[in-house]
Amino acid sequence: MTEMLTGDHAEVDALFRDLWREFDRGGAHAVFERLDYLWARLAVHVRAEHLHLFPALLAASGRSQGQGKDDAPASGEVRAAVEHLREDHDFFMRELAGAVNAARELAAQDGPPDRERLLHIRGRASAVAERLAEHNRMEEQQVYLWPVALLTESELDTLRGGMKREIENLPPRFSGGAPR
Ligand SMILES: [Fe+2]
Ligand SMILES: [Fe+2]
């Protein structure tokens, strides 16, 4: 499961690199398309953590307090981490949605895009990328290791299945994959 989630982080990182290249080219429509896709990819990842990973960790940490394996985190530690990660998720979704909308408006205008507005959109996306790097580090080095320490084999299977379904559940308009 760790590999699936870590691999998904790497895919989103690659989408950010494509996005920066698109900003350098300066076309508002292409920026909009890449931002929109990136937003959708990150949204399914966030939803998978939100709907499956966090509830499973919270439930298991409450249950196994004091009798877990040596490497199992204390329930207070799990709660604090989940709360922190959720706040990050809210920030990512809010800021990216704002950037997508601004890019959509810019792309709908005639003529060459306004440099200032494009830079402003880039700034919002780059604030997300910076906080996301720290967020992903915390997940990969800590939180993603917890399911194995806290859950039973069958709970792990259920969690894996739920996360995979969610991550693969992109809106149909993105079925063609990343914009070319
Ligand atoms: Fe996350
Ligand atoms: Fe994540």
Image (spheres, rainbow, N blue to C red):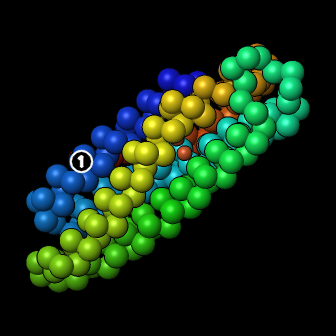
In the displayed structure, would residue 89 be above or below residue 114?
Answer: above
- In this view, the residue farthest toward the bottom is 110
Rendering quarter of residue 86? bottom right
Position of residue 111 in the picture relative to residue 163 (left or right): left
Q: Which residue is mark 1?
A: 18
Q: Nearer the viewer, residue 27 or 51?
A: 51
Q: Residue at point 71% right, 40% down?
A: 78
The quarter in which the N terminus is drawn is: top right
Q: Residue at point 21% right, 72% down?
A: 118
Position of residue 2 in the picture relative to residue 157 (left or right): left
Q: Residue at point 14% right, 76% down?
A: 115
Where residue 87 sits in the image (x, y, percent)? 59, 58
Where residue 153 sits in the image (x, y, percent)? 76, 16
Where residue 163 sits in the image (x, y, percent)? 63, 35
Position of residue 110 in the picture relative to residue 68 (left or right): left
Residue 177 is at least partly visible in this image: no
* Mark 1 surroundings: few (<14), some (14-19) or many (≥20) residues within 10 A: some
In the displayed structure, would residue 7 be above or below residue 109?
Answer: above
Element assignment for label 1: helix
Which amino acid type corresponds to the residue marked 1 in the rendered image?
A: Asp
